[in-house]
Amino acid sequence: MTDHADGTAGTRRWRALAVCLVAAFMTLLDVSIVNVALPSIREGLHASEASLQWILSGYALTFGLVLVPAGRLGDARSRRAVFLAGLALFTLASAVAGVAPGIGWLIGARLVQGVAGGVLTPQVAGFIQQLFQGPDRGRAFGALGTVIGVATAAGPLIGGALIALAGPDEGWRWVFYVNVPVGLAALPIAHRLLPAPERGERRGQDVPGVVLLGAAVLVLMLPFVQERQWHGALKWLLVPAALLLLAAFVRRERRAAAPMVDLALFRHRSYALGSAIALLYFAGFTGIFFIFTLYLQNGLGYSAFGAGLAITPFALGSGSGAAAGGRLVAHYGRPLVATGLAMVAAGLVGAWLAVELHPGGGVAWLTAAPLLVAGVGSGFVISPNQTITLSEVPSAEGGSAAGVLQTGQRVGTAVGIAGVGAVFFAAVGSARPGAAEAWADGFRRGLVVILVFVLCALAAALADLGLNRRGRLRDRVPPPTPAPPAARR
């Protein structure tokens, strides 16, 4: 193959990645952009608190339900076809959400959006595994990490800007409309640039495994996403029920001729430990945006745009940290993740002190520097951890392995927001909007819970480093296996 051909193939790979990242950005943006639109939705559609909760949690729930089977479907059949189907469905559901005449329509559209996002997302990691090798794979995952960090943190800012421009009555609809032109433009480009499936044996789907895992994820997440709506302690009986379903799933997968999840993946410490770090970290950091925007809007009277702007330092830090982390992970490995977790913890402590010293209207300025530090640290965690976690996964298993990893992230997000939210609202109590001190106290207590999750993730990373020093495991990304001929083409 000529140098020119190599260069053309390399350019095409990066263009294909760009299309994947645009689609991933849309699905991840919809996790956080809706937060600042909830007051407008409540007024515009006369929605109850339970309905608003389902707009948020319903998306996360259906998103998490389909990640693993969708990843396996892409691995077994055609990643391109599954990606395009997910993108088309997400675009359609966004349009329906924008024109929703009532709250029932909006909740239904959000549930479908979640399904579409869960179908699309694992294909992105699968394509990265398929198309990139060595340092390029780290840079590709760095770009994905940038998208994850920026989309999650920039959601409130973009949502606030749309509401400010279109007005409170129609602005919330544009939170959903904005996906439609992007999706329509991305569909033909993705069809042209994404690689077609390789010819070969098509593996079947493990239908009993799909049912068991889906039931386990649903039963596990429900008490957390409905924590404020389902009163009493009986809901927590669903957690041991979910563990029993998960045990039945593991037993099924060990005996299945064509398992949905190759359990041998968890024999790799890089995958098992990285999945645990991801679950713990997502349980922590996603709660920051939830309680910070509530504190600013309800406690201090910030506008939706102002609350989103206050999160911008974290978004900027996360984007720059993820881009740098993608380049550095091949050299530093797990110590880079541990450094990032330590920076996040330091930033959270700084934000806690800022609110303790000055809980009033200027708190956004005082928290800017700590949030910037935490954002850079977050960039050093998400992208490098994903690179290390998937480093020993064969490309043929890339989608399902990424689906399992991302399911853990979604479960962690649900658990974290439930735990952080419970502490936050217990502290706020019946405080009226504008009672700054009560909302500031709730924010500080919520930060403590977030800090506990982050420190648990840091402890896992440091424990791994301790084992590495005793020679049991390399802490850097292993040398890449040679790419199959189709991936090199």
Image (spheres, helix red, strand yellow):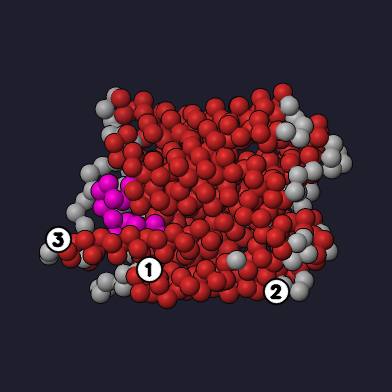
Viewer-nearest of labels 1 and 2? Answer: 2
Q: Quadrant of the C terminus?
A: bottom left
Q: Residue at x 43, y 69 (%)?
A: 83
Please report whichever mark, 3 or 1, sits nearer to the chain's N-terminal start.
3
Q: How many residues crowd around disc 3 within 10 Å: few (fewer than 14), some, or many (20 or more)?
A: few
The outermost residue toward the left is 1
Q: Quadrant of the N terminus?
A: bottom left
Marks 3/1 in contact by CB < 8 Å: the verdict is: no
Residue 3: which numbered mark, if any? Answer: 3
Task: Please say whether residue 35 is one of the residues in the magenta stretch.
Answer: no
Viewer-nearest of labels 2 and 3? Answer: 3
Q: Which residue is mark 1?
A: 79
Position of residue 377 relative to residue 246, above or below, is above
Q: Residue at x 44, y 59 (%)?
A: 21
Examine the image and state in which quarter residue 80 appears: bottom left
Q: Nearer the viewer, residue 19 or 67?
A: 19
Q: Main secondary structure of the magenta part?
A: helix
Task: For mark 2, give the secondary structure.
Answer: helix
Task: For mark 1, give the secondary structure.
Answer: helix
Examine the image and state in which quarter residue 104 appears: bottom right
Distance from the alpha carbon under mark 3 to that under mark 1: 28 Å
